Amino acid sequence: MHQPLSLNELRALLGRVFSMDALAEWGLLLGCLALAALLSWALSRAVTRRGNSVLFGERVLDGALFPLLALALAFGVRRLLPLWGLAPALFKLALPVLVSLAVIRVIARVLAAAWPNSAPIRLVERIGSWAVWLGAVLWITGLLPVILDELDDIGWKFGAVKLTLRNLIEGGLTAALVLVVALWISAAIESRLLRRESMDLSMRKIAASAIRALLLFVGLLFALSAAGIDLTALGVLGGALGVGLGFGLQKLAANYVSGFVILAERSLRIGDMVKVDGFEGRVTDIKTRYTVIRSLGGKEAIVPNEMLITQRVENSSLADPRVLLSTIVQVDYDCDVDVVMKTLTEALAKVPRVLSDPGPAVQLTRFADSGLELTVHFWIMDPENGSGGVRSDVNLAILQTLKRLGVDIPYPQQVQRQPRPTQAASGSPLAP
């Protein structure tokens, strides 16, 4: 195990690192880094990876695999140096640096995979990175054991249990490490589940959410145990949490339960066209607490899952994605209605996005004041693309067909009557 150095030993070690005797170690260290980069690149080409993975990152060398391989190779070379007649100097400094880099890369990539594009997570990542580098510097300089001894003297006593500041810090670090490992495993399983095309997307989402919640729960138990917290105290905490859920957190708990119910029953699926509380759009994501609905105009609504369970939801594509649309037109009373209806039906069948099965239909629905009112019904298969474009195409086809047939669309007409004169031209009064 690498031992911390005193200040005098560190000063002597730095003098040896930058001397001519350390050239062989520099060459071996650079060789380890080059070999680690080559292996990382070769594995990235051999393994199918998608997006920003934990091991390979975005550009291979910014992932966690490169520092882990470099650390393993450097540790192996460090063990072989005495067999080659070399006294390790550079590797005593390189190994803590590589350990810190590997820890930072793993934490950063796991947090980025679990919560992508999150500003608070980026802040936590920076704080964790500075803490790891500070710990490495304190370890190399030999100050870390001194600081830990001082922290061990600061403590509190709760009944028969004595708790020190060192125990709190070490337990917190251990808990964070356990949670990072749990997040890494859950992110890997979730990525594999979401790539399986044979399973419905909603079922993949509920499986991924359930696995993440289970692993985080198990990781939290391990983290609390590693931090020295008695798990039997969780019984009291569970009772208090139950009271809190019954009063202040009941809405939040209802949303989470409703989210799992929606995913399990598949009453709403990603891609469905729905209308909730007057807002119509396409379901783009279903979270455990809320559902995201994006309208055709680009607006997004975040709807609590409880609302989707307790209120009426219009789903245009639950059992059948076909949607019936209609438009109304009036024609002159003098036209041949049978010919007009037949010709309009044939013309609408040629409009893009209008289905042929069931095909369009034209019905005489009302004898209006100015003309005969015809209602045109037609079906579409892709409501997620909107209805305004296809309705406009249908209206243009109707207008062109009526012009070709010579059928007028009547204007509103009003009949005005002149009042009868109350007196004849001779001036004699007339009977009313």
Image (cartoon, helix red, strand yellow):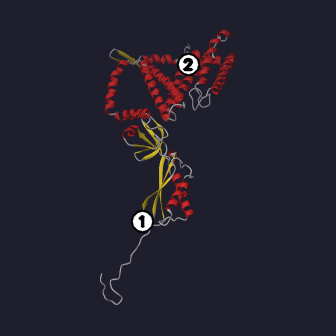
Q: Secondary structure at mark 2?
A: helix
Q: Is residue 246 left or right of residue 296?
A: left
> Residue 31's image quarter?
top right
Of marks 2 and 1, the one in the foreground? 1
Which amino acid type is marked by label 1? Answer: Asp
Q: Which mark is residue 140?
A: 2
Q: CA distance from mark 2 to mark 1?
A: 95 Å
Q: Quadrant of the C terminus?
A: bottom left
At label 1, counting other C-alpha atoms closer than 10 Å, the crowd grade (few under 14, some 14-19, many 20 or more) is: few
Residue at image coords 46%, 40%: 319
- Which amino acid type corresponds to the residue marked 2 in the rendered image? Ile
Q: Is residue 160 left or right of residue 197?
A: left
Nearest the camera: 326 or 72?
A: 326
Asked if 144 appears above or below 203 in the picture, the reply is: above
**First-in-chain label (2 vs 1):** 2
Q: Can you identify the residue that label 1 sits on?
A: 369
**Where residue 155 sits in the image (x, y, percent)?**
39, 18
Q: Nearer the viewer, residue 46 or 239?
A: 46
Q: Position of residue 215 (x, y in %)?
A: 46, 24
Instruction: List x then y, in percent, for residue 323.
Output: 48, 47
Closer to us: 295 or 247:
295
Q: Quadrant of the N terminus?
A: top right
Q: Position of residue 430 (x, y in %)?
A: 31, 85
Answer with the quarter of the image where residue 102 lies. Answer: top right
On screen, residue 162 versus residue 334, left or right, reads left
Task: Choose between 262 and 161: the one closer to the eye.
Answer: 262
Measuring 58% from the left and 17% from the top, which residue is drawn there? Answer: 10
